[in-house]
Image: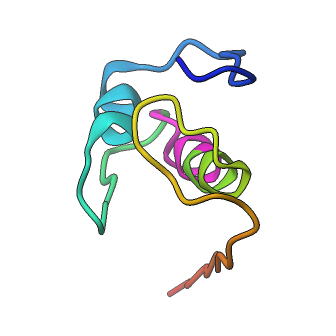
Amino acid sequence: MKPGCRRWIQWLPPQDEFHRDPSMVKLLRTGNQIGKTTAGLAEVHWRCMGLHPHLETREPPIEAWVICASW
């Protein structure tokens, strides 16, 4: 784990698999109560801070967009 990156949450297996996926575009699709929003926001936060525990990230600051679409 990178210095300064502490784990304050114990990720569920689907969340952990999502975080470890090195794909440029990721999608976490599951049923209810898996924590899709929490996992997604953690991913954005880590990338913005340059502290992703599993993947190489760019040095901050970066530009990141979070877009929420609702039917």
Percent x, y for residue 69? 55, 84
Is residue 40 shown in magenta?
A: yes
Residue at image location 58% in from the left, 50% down from the top: 37
Residue at image location 54% in from the left, 39% down from the top: 52
Residue at image location 33% in from the left, 41% down from the top: 18
* Model colouring: rainbow
Percent x, y for residue 5? 68, 24
Pick the residue in front: 32 or 43: 43
Which picture quadrant has residue 60?
bottom right
Q: Is residue 29 left or right of residue 11?
A: left
Q: Is residue 58 above or below residue 39?
A: below
Q: How many marks?
A: 0
The span picked out in magenta is: 34-42
Pick the residue in front: 35 or 21: 21
Which picture quadrant has residue 44?
bottom right
Q: Is residue 19 above or below residue 68?
A: above
Residue at image location 64% in from the left, 51% down from the top: 41
